[in-house]
Image (cartoon, rainbow, N blue to C red):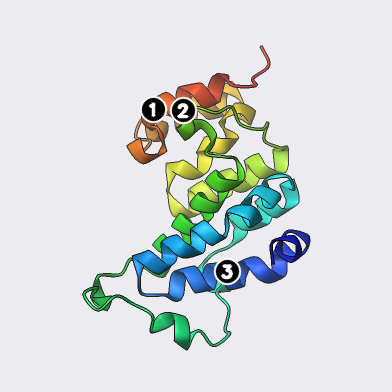
Amino acid sequence: FSAVCSESPQVLLPYLMAAYVQCNSDQIRAEILSSSKAIAKRLGMQPSAMMFLYTLDSSMLSEAPMEDIKNMKKEDEPVENQPSSDTLCDHFILSMTNLALEGGPAAGKSSVLATPELIETSKLRYIKSNDVRFLLHALNGLSRNELVGYLPSLLNMPNDFGGFKAVVMQIFSNRSP
């Protein structure tokens, strides 16, 4: 599955995201992400696949029947407390990105230089979701003016992504003088 998905991410990633978003259990979502590590690692080697990942959203959720996944839930987990589809899509994309980049700056690891296309896609995803975490992997490719413009948002980087320390590390990693 990993080899097929990395060869045709436009076909298979929406199904994987649909499975993640449409199930009603955090435990099953964790299993989906755990099972997706090999796929994410292969995606990290392909800039076009990473860009496609950032363009996914809840409107692209597969229309394939997912009733078996929807009905899988822990007995004590109420369905009404589930996050929105958009929130789950964002979480899936960020998790896959972090897996693809081996934890990236939040894990204290230097990341790959972002391509201009990935930088632009990251900015668009940030604008759409207003989630500053989408900018993290593109920071070392932003101009000084862009960094200054995003700074107020970057100061609020969530601690689960390394907080502002991760922002500083990312800005200075692999950056040309």
Q: Is residue 133 visible?
A: yes
Residue at 55%, 74% in the rendered image: 61
Residue at 51%, 73% in the rendered image: 19
User: 131 and 97: which one is in front?
Assistant: 97
* Disc 1 residue type (three-letter): Phe
Q: CA distance from mark 1 to mark 2?
A: 5 Å
User: 28 and 52: which one is in front?
Assistant: 28
Q: Which residue is mark 2?
A: 167
x, y percent for residue 158? 35, 39
Is 69 above or below relative to 95? below
* Disc 2 residue type (three-letter): Val
* Disc 3 residue type (three-letter): Leu
Q: Is residue 109 left or right of residue 112?
A: left
- Secondary element under disc 3, as helix, strand or loop, is helix
- Secondary element under disc 2, as helix, strand or loop, is helix
Are the two marked residues, 2 and 3, in contact with CB atoms closer than 8 angstroms? no
The answer to which of marks 2 and 3 sits earlier in the sequence is: 3
Q: How crowded is the residue under tag 2: few (<14 C-alpha within 10 Å), some, or many (20+)?
A: many
- Tell which residue pokes out farthest to the right in this image: 7
Q: CA distance from mark 2 to mark 3?
A: 29 Å
The answer to which of marks 3 and 1 sits earlier in the sequence is: 3
Residue at 36%, 75% in the rendered image: 24
- Secondary element under disc 1, as helix, strand or loop, is helix
* Camera-nearest label, 3 or 1: 3
Is 125 above or below relative to 167? below
Q: Which residue is mark 1?
A: 164
Q: Quadrant of the N terminus?
A: bottom right
Q: Which residue is mark 3?
A: 16
